[in-house]
Image: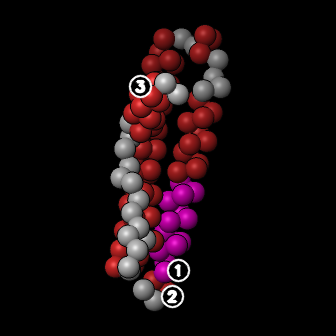
Amino acid sequence: MTKKQRMIKQNLFEDQQQHLEARMEKLSMFTQEHFEEYSEKKLSELKRRMMDLSTLVDNLCLKLFECIEYDLLGKLQFSSHLHRVVSYNPNGVEKASEINSLSGL
């Protein structure tokens, strides 16, 4: 990989990282809302926006993982050491909680 290609891929990664961070901040702000003061209509709209944003965040996470694995670590796949990024799983938190509860942690 040339220095120019590496810089392009690094910029792409950082751009995706910034998009993810901004969307996570926005999603986090939704949790600070005073839901008890909202009408049914406003609650319904907020729920829709949160679901849309959650889907977007999920897609951005997937793109970020793919960028790391294929673009940033891609050249390492052909080296003598095997480097691998664990595949992105949108249910990772739930699965980790299940494993912890089964193991008594």
Residue shown at the point (38%, 79%) measured from the top left: 80
Q: Which residues are the magenta region?
A: 6-19
Tell me if residue 10 is in the magenta stretch: yes
- Give the alpha-carbon distance from disc 1 to disc 2, as whole Å: 6 Å
Depth check, front residue: 66 or 101: 101
Pointer 1 and pointer 2: residues touching (CB < 8 Å)? yes
Point out the frontmost of discs 2 and 3: 3
What SS does tag 3 mark?
A: helix
Query: Residue 102 — which label?
Result: 3
Three-letter amino acid code at disc 2?
Answer: Lys
Three-letter amino acid code at disc 3?
Answer: Leu
What SS does tag 1 mark?
A: helix
Query: Residue 7 — which label?
Result: 1
- Tell which circle, 2 or 3, labels the residue nearer the N-terminal end: 2
Q: Where in the figure is residue 15, as x and y percent of width and height?
A: 53, 63
Three-letter amino acid code at disc 1?
Answer: Met
What SS does tag 2 mark?
A: helix
Check the image and report above or below for 85 versus 71: above
| Residue, disc 2 | 3
Residue shown at the point (53%, 28%) measured from the top left: 105
Check the image and report above or below for 77 versus 24: below
- Tell which circle, 3 or 1, labels the residue nearer the N-terminal end: 1
Depth check, front residue: 102 or 18: 102
Point out the frontmost of discs 3 and 1: 3
- Give the alpha-carbon distance from disc 3 to disc 1, as whole Å: 44 Å
Pointer 3 and pointer 1: residues touching (CB < 8 Å)? no
Name the dominant secondary structure of the magenta segment: helix
Visible residue check, residue 58: yes
The reply, left or right, for residue 79 in relation to residue 46 is left
Q: Where in the figure is residue 42, as x and y percent of width and height?
A: 51, 18
